[in-house]
Image (tube, rainbow, N blue to C red):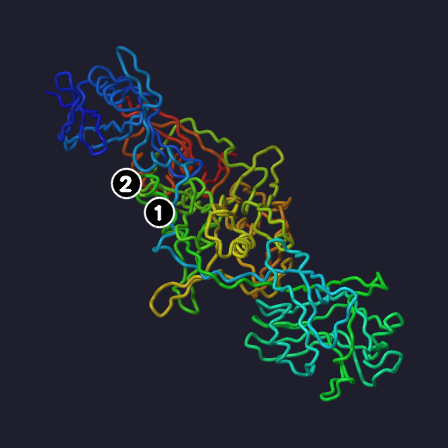
Amino acid sequence: MRVKEWLFFLADENGATYSVSGNDVVTTPTQTPLPNSPDGWISQGVSLAKNMTYLGLDRSFTVPLRFVRQGAKILRSLVYNGSIEAKVFLVVLKLNSKTQIHETYYKGEIDFSQMDDQDSYFDVNLAEGGVMYFIKKNEDVKYEIPLDDNSEVIRLSGINLKQSTTSLLVGKADQFNATLFGGHLPASSIISNEGDNVPTSVEATDFVPLRDNDPSDNTAVYNTGNLIFQATTTSTVTFSPDFEFKTGNYRTGPTGIQPNFPVAGIQIKVDLRIFNSTGTFKQSLSIYTSDNVGLYFTEAGLTSKNLVRHHIVGNYQVSVENGDKVFLFIYATHWRPGAPLVGGEWVSFWYNDFEDPTLTPGTTAFRFDFLYPTTPCRALLLGDLFTRMVSKISNGQFTGNADFIRPTGDGSPTNPFRAILVTSGDGVRQISDAVIKTSFKDCYKSIDAVKSVGVRNVQNVLTIDSRQNCLSGNIAYDLGVVKKVRILPADKFYYSSVKVGFPSSDYEDNNGRYEFNNTSIFNAPMGRIVNELDLTSSFRGDSYGIEFLRVNTAGKTTTDNASDNSVFLIDCIGYLDEGGAVVWEPFRQVFYEVEGLLSSTVYNIGISPKRLLSIHGGYLRSVLYKREGTSLTYQTTDKNSKLKTTSITGAVVDEDADMPIGLLGQPFFKPFIIEFTTKYPLGILDVVQMSRSGMIQITDYKGRTYSGALIDGGVKPTTKEEQSWSILCSINTDLTKRI
């Protein structure tokens, strides 16, 4: 009896095949083929096509299949006793003419979502099985990837944030038309902060008298605890006072006696007294000194008082270190022990005067750097997020391979690990059950944005590889002489503008205006093409956004911030500690010169939009082949476009400068599609799909050779008739031979 060349099976997820026993649909552990081949099989083709999103090759059937009799009964039973989500697979075996053994030729899942059940047949489409089935079906579904105990930990050290805080200085909060005697620390209350997302280092103060204190005794000043400022980082602080008070020399005595004379040597002084975090005095910054105290009669002579007005105004700078405490001390000298009627302790200070309505409370302002303490942040290596996403999206059935984007370096002090890590807003906030919530498509898009990659299906292991390897490489199959060769523009690859970078965020803060990791747009020299190439990341890369999230949600444990579900990329370096664990921290490159930044403590400069443009340089230049005399013209960005860095070696990266095409990476394809017709055995698809790019070589009837990555091609296994194929022209193909 003649052996059938093709065998067809309907099988469940575990490989058991369905058959009809009597009137029942049953499963059998042994393979039971359908007695009737699906109609349409003769005209059925199998094709490979370049997935233009992920740049891998997808295999598919080209037309629906029609099942009759037992095949139709099995499908009806499964969908009507179950649902259109029933897991059923068509398995096709082909006879090996040499071994006379049937070998697996194709396995695809039945797609009931487009079924057509009629009395005499049951039509369905097939979906490619394996890992790509899950990717295509669920690529837009958001999954939660836990930041668990197996996560990496980043020591998130802060950014020096610029802040300016203004306080109302009232002297003594409950004072009205009364005097303050001698040295004191005045009362003040904060009225405004320039940076809405930045905490302040300024403190509200109470009125604390130090009338009986020797002004040179700093211990008494520190012991009040009435500091007006505490530094969080080493920086230069600018103190800008603008307030007034009056002074007079208060003397006691019988009514009618008028000792109207000044006391020699008395001065009015305003100082900033600075101490370190443990209370050790460091320095005194003199803000104001005056010799004129004014005269003041006895209590009976209030209506004829003679006061001197003092206006404390200006800008004063002082260097502070982390933890330093600053006190505002106002006093008079000289101080004389044992002489109660003589000296600074008897000078009266007036912040209000009922006879002078122009004397009103003034202000003090501090301009300073704020640095939030280092906090731990759970994160994942970008490659680990990818492999976890593959497992999650396929319900654990398949795995991913992200070796291409694994960390570089060895973790030593001279060669630290370098990697991009990913975390979430909750991870930044140190929420205990923090997760990264994202879809596979957004995950891939973000990896591609910073690494320029594609994704290949290598025997159902989803594998990250470079764009260059997905679109060029070694020849996988030589088809020999083919027919009807023609050359067409690779219009799916053309672009008139390119977007690079990250999503933009609105912080409503002056510091945030200097964020450079936003979306940048460059125009390409393509006058006849209108198409935007989007190479942006779906994940954020703004270090200011991370810092604002840290400082604004400190101590909060509930999900109540707009950035909680945001996903962030952090460019990191890592060192091995004594126990062999990796200690990660944001990478802050040292430059010879930097322009356009408020602070050198920002990070993620290594993944700035202009640098990402260069990462995609080879691909961009391939599409703009032979346009080396032109440039990608900078158009716009949402915030800071003025970042410009000069490395120690002299390399300059200017974010808002045009990018000459000739300075991009080397091209690895030419922007043309080569179409042809051919017919070849089924085995070619397996060979091509196993290669990195599906590189094919052909020869036309004149002996001219062409090569390129497969874009679309297929075979009809039953009729072996000719099919149309197309490849992306390789950089090595000499098209001038057609002239």
Residue 304, how many percent across, how many down? Answer: 89, 72
Residue 387's label in the rendered image is 1
Instruction: Answer above or below: position of 5 versus 336.
Output: above
Using the rendered image of the protein, determine whether residue 715 is visible from the camera's viewpoint: no
Q: Tell me residue 257's x, y (percent).
A: 88, 81
Residue for point 69% across, 60% down: 166
| Residue found at the far top of this picture | 119
Residue annotated with mark 2 = 397
Q: Residue at x 77, y 79 (%)?
A: 346
User: Pointer 2: residues within 10 angstroms few (<14), some, or many (20+)?
Assistant: few
Q: Which of 373 and 543 is in front in this view?
A: 373
| Front-most of residues 295 and 652 | 295
The amino acid type of the residue labelled 1 equals: Thr
Query: Which residue is situated farthest in the left direction here?
Result: 1
Q: How far apart are marks 2 and 1 (CA)?
A: 12 Å
Residue closer to the observer: 571 or 614: 571
Q: Dot 1, how many residues are within 10 Å of its Cα: few (below 14), some (14-19), or many (20+)?
A: some
Q: In this view, does 394 lie to the left or right of 191?
A: left
Quadrant location of residue 331? bottom right
Relative to the observer, which residue lies in front, 184 or 597? Answer: 184
The single residue placed furthest to the front in the displayed view is 255
- Residue at 74% in and 63% down: 363
Q: Earlier in the sequence, mark 2 or mark 1?
A: 1
Q: Where is residue 274 in the image (x, y as percent from the top left)?
A: 64, 75
Q: Is residue 603 above or below residue 299?
A: above
